[in-house]
Image: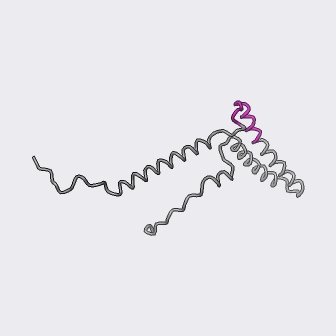
Amino acid sequence: MTKPSNDTPRDEPPPPELGDLSARLKDLSGRIAAERSEQAESTKPSASMQGATGFAKGYRLASEFVAGTLVGGLIGYGIDWLFGTLPFGLIFFLLLGFGAGILNMARAGNRAPLAQERLGSNPPPKAALDDDDED
């Protein structure tokens, strides 16, 4: 049997790093909970889509897509008719209308927030510092 050494006193307070670590952990837990609640709120369907049945939601999303594509095609055909460049404007604006239809569908389904909400709610992330040792 060996005798325990009395080199270290037993009544020492914990090192300051542990107290700082626990405060940082509590702060991180609070920020994670706040972010989760914000994400839960943003995934809720929009007020115009909450009371709708499945068929109504489907028809609304389909009409958003078709309207965007048709408007793009009509604008392209009109520009081609004015300038006499038939396939180019039609193809370009048809693709542009297709993209706008997809974006309108995503907004109607509340999957993509409006640009003002995206820019206003979350500031851009800070740039990472470059490591000079990697060169």
Number of numbered callouts drawn: 0
Residue at 21 percent of width and 55 percent of height: 9
Residue 19: x and y in percent read 37, 54
Query: Looking at this rendering, what residue extends furthest in the right direction?
Result: 82
- On screen, residue 15 versus residue 51, left or right, reads left
- On screen, residue 7 versus residue 23, left or right, reads left
Residue at 35 percent of width and 54 percent of height: 18
Asked if residue 134 lies in the magenta stretch, the reply is: no
Tell me which corner region of the image, top left, top right, bottom left or bottom right, holds residue 44.
Answer: top right
- On screen, residue 104 versus residue 13, left or right, reads right
Of the pair 73 and 60, the residue shown nearer to us:
60
Residue 6: x and y in percent read 16, 54
Tell me which segment is drawn in magenta: 49-65
Query: Looking at this rendering, what residue extends furthest in the front direction?
Result: 11
Residue at 39 percent of width and 54 percent of height: 21
Q: Main secondary structure of the magenta part?
A: helix
- On screen, residue 1 versus residue 66, left or right, reads left
Of the pair 69 and 61, the residue shown nearer to us:
61
The quarter in which the C terminus is drawn is bottom left
Tell me which corner region of the image, top left, top right, bottom left or bottom right, holds residue 79.
Answer: bottom right
Asked if residue 55 lies in the magenta stretch, the reply is: yes
